Amino acid sequence: MKFAAAIFALIVVALIVPFFIPGAGQKEGVDPNANLPWQVAVDDRGESTVFGLTPGTSTLGDVRRQFGDELEVAIVAEPNEVGLLEGYYAQVALGFVLAKVIVTVDAKNEAISEMRERALKAKHMDSTTRKITLHPDDRAAAEGLPIKAISVIPTVNLDEATVIQRFGQPDERLVVSASRVHLLYPRLGLDVMVDADGKELLQYVAPRQFSLLSEPLKAGAGGGASAQ
């Protein structure tokens, strides 16, 4: 499954609660001003930290410790593809922001294939995509694997102006359709997809690995990119 496109298989209808209104998503015990989506720290080694996690370094176990034990872990695969090992939260409080969170685990295809052979069950997420539950031994082993991407699906729709207000002007604006545009922030390792007809998606990788996001997008968009 294409990395940049694979996350879209997990986008589902979100709860209708405010995303960028301070106080709206506050939960008891959560600092509303910490771990917000636009609080991205970048170092000179091409690493970034967001939500207290560092893509490429933090493990699936670190994700569980940061966000809680509600983490669901499975292989998500389309027909004739090995699939991706992913962790999923139906709702996480990111400061005062409520969102669905998906983390993609950095696991080799050979390892995922072996996990599939030992898997307990598989269920269809839609007409083509399958969600495959891991064997308990593989589930435990996955806790020590690093994550390579963090994806956030906010619980309400965003517009481009709001994204730019929070993150600044993007380095590149990639138009893929009349309703969908990607705002690329390679210095942050961030791609924000704004969709006028659906849900928005924020994807974080280590800045040094930004090509994981940008290259598939540009290949699929033809000549739709416009530099800012």
Image (cartoon, rainbow, N blue to C red):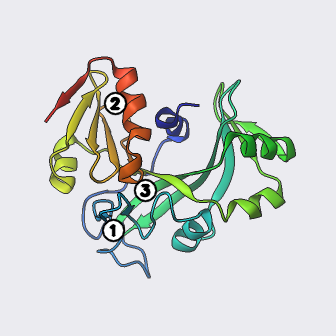
Residue 183 circle label: none
Where residue 27 appears, as percent x and y from the top left, is: 42, 74
Q: Which mark is residue 197?
A: 2
**Contact (Cβ within 8 Å) of mark 2 with mark 3:** no
Determine which quarter of the picture holds residue 180.
top left
- Label 1, on which residue? 96
Crowding near the residue tagged with mark 2, few <14, some 14–19, many ≥20 C-alpha atoms within 10 Å:
few
Q: Residue at x 69, y 40 (%)?
A: 109
The amino acid marked with disc number 1 is Phe
Depth check: 53 or 165 in front? 53
Image quadrant assignment for residue 34: bottom left
Residue at 69%, 44% (x, y): give it.
75
Marks 1 and 3: CB-CB under 8 Å?
A: no
Residue 85 image position (x, y, % from top left): 65, 47
> Is 214 drawn above or below residue 136 in the view shown?
above
Q: Earlier in the sequence, mark 2 or mark 3?
A: 3
